[in-house]
Amino acid sequence: MIPLSEELSIRIHGDASLPTLVYLPGIHGDWTLVASFRAALAGRVRFVEFTYPRTLTWSLDDYADAIKSALAEHGIACGCVLAESFGSQVAWQLIGKNDRVFKADSLILAGGFVRYPTKWNVRLARRICRGVSMTSLTRFLFCYARYAKFRHRHAPETLASLAEFLERRTELDRQAAVHRLDLISANDPRPIANRVTLPVYSLTGFFDPIVPWWRVRPWLRANCPGYRAGKIILRADHNVLGTAPRAAAAIVEHWIRGGKEASD
């Protein structure tokens, strides 16, 4: 059984001599959907990944502080932050705390955002997530599992992690997701983004009704001093790292190593 403690879980893949990539997951809160992306980068980066606790009380500062402490315990003082969806909200807090404990070299938003651009979308997602029963959730997960076999058909490592993904979807996990939606709704990291000068990149799938890149990207271009480039992967969706793992890995590695590329 997966522990339900309020402790952050960390895993590190790869040698310390490689560039460090710190992955912060989305609203699902774990590393189960990033396996194929991680495999595509094997031997090219030191991949650091987290699973969030199923907490109903942590603030975004608490998330950032726990991540920073976990990195420090493993001697990781710097690296590129790869923030997926909800993880972007944690990342802005982490970057806002850039200090001697952990200093971000760059930030890559994977389906991520600054201030969530359509608040009604968050309210709707929260209402659905809060009101769903475990019976309905179980039925949905059964349907999702069948769809996921098609969705991740080009990502065998992610398919292999599907059982763990489904196991983690418990009642407490649902409540934790509602809490994270509340954090998104209340958060406004624009003052942090307005002063960030480290390189910031945006990676998105073309089919993304959850986080509309056509609203996020122009804001970054106009208001974030560190914004460098963005890339849209045409056949991917909101979970761009999971639905286009090899293409996403090539772009991320290019950015980590200082490559410059014009935005789409």
Image (cartoon, helix red, strand yellow):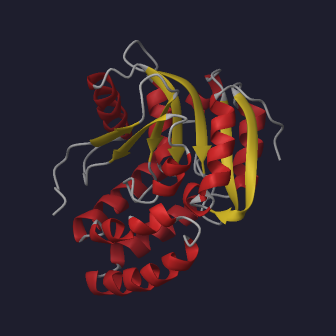
Does residue 14 sit above or below 171 in this rendering? above
Of residues 153 and 109, the one drawn nearer to the viewer in this rendering? 153
Does residue 192 sit above or below 53 in this rendering? above
Where residue 204 appears, as percent x and y from the top left, is 67, 53
> Exactly how many numbered labels are in the figure?
0
Where residue 257 appears, as percent x and y from the top left, is 65, 27
Q: Which residue is drawn at 37% across and 33% down?
A: 64
Where residue 263 appears, as percent x and y from the top left, is 81, 41
Where residue 120 sits, quadrant-wise, is bottom right
Left or right: residue 251 versus residue 36 is right
- Is residue 92 in view? yes
Left or right: residue 83 versus residue 257 is left
Left or right: residue 92 versus residue 253 is left
Where residue 252 sits, quadrant-wise, is top right
Q: Residue furthest front?
A: 43
Of residues 191 and 88, the one drawn nearer to the viewer in this rendering? 88
Q: Which residue is drawn at 83% across and 47% down?
A: 264
Left or right: residue 155 versus residue 54 is right
Q: Residue at x 38, y 85 (%)?
A: 142
